[in-house]
């Protein structure tokens, strides 16, 4: 009869000196989200676990997407600040590139959006 030693060593696979802190994100999709939902603001469709641009199926629930919620609250997920002499002289070209890139991203990913562009003498945010 074979007897196998039952040594069980419990070791973490990876040790990190920094504790993993939970950062709450109130704009994260809730775990109890409906299976199929449509955003009443932008008409994106939540299906198969992510937001998509597609025709809304009949009987879909209404759920405001995180991008529309962030826009309504005025809280962007990220902020880009452009400043300096080059930005001042090439502002229109830079903003055209930004808008072009945003249009491409938004066509593929409904949550990738440009919330607002504010320009003044100091630069562009
Ligand atoms: Zn939306």
Image: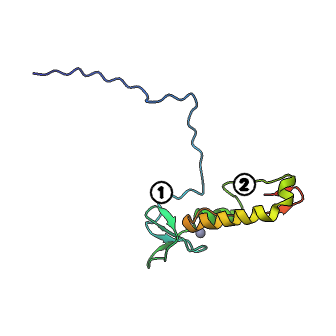
Query: Residue 43: x percent and y percent?
Result: 56, 74
Pointer 1 local density, CA inside 10 Å: few below 14, some 14–19, many at least 20: few
Q: Kindly identify the residue that appears in the image at 45 percent across and 69 percent down.
A: 36
In the depicted structure, whether residue 10 falls above or below residue 84? above
Q: Is residue 14 left or right of residue 72?
A: left
Q: Which mark is residue 67?
A: none
Residue 20 is situated, as x and y percent measured from the top left of the image, at 56, 37
Does the image show residue 94?
yes
| Screen quadrant of the N terminus | top left
In the picture as drawn, the residue positioned furthest to the right comes out as 121
Q: CA distance from mark 2 to mark 1?
A: 27 Å
> Could you tell whether 39 is left or right of 96 in the image?
left
In the image, residue 88 sits, relative to residue 107, either above or below, namely above
- Going 43% across and 30% down the picture, which residue do you hit? 13
The residue carrying mark 2 is: 79
Q: Earlier in the sequence, mark 2 or mark 1?
A: 1
Determine the secondary structure under disc 1. loop
Residue under the point 87% across and 53% down: 85
Using the rendered view, name the quadrant where residue 114 is placed: bottom right
Q: Nearer the viewer, mark 2 or mark 1?
A: 2
Task: Judge by depth and name the residue closer to the eye, 94 or 41.
Answer: 94
Location of residue 32 with respect to 62 vertically, above or below:
above
Which circle marks residue 31 in the picture? 1
Looking at the image, is 106 positioned above or below residue 56? above
């Amino acid at each position: 009869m074979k007897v196998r030693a039952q040594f069980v060593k419990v070791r973490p696979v990876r040790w990190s000196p920094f504790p993993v802190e939970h950062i709450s994100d109130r704009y994260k999709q809730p775990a109890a989200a409906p299976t199929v939902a449509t955003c009443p603001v932008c008409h994106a469709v939540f299906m198969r676990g992510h937001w998509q641009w597609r025709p809304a199926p009949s009987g879909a629930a209404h759920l405001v997407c995180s991008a529309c919620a962030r826009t309504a609250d005025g809280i962007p997920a990220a902020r880009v600040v452009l400043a300096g002499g080059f930005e001042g002289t090439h502002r229109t070209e830079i903003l055209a590139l930004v808008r072009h890139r945003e249009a491409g991203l938004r066509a593929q990913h409904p949550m990738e959006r440009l919330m607002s562009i504010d320009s003044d003498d100091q630069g562009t945010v």
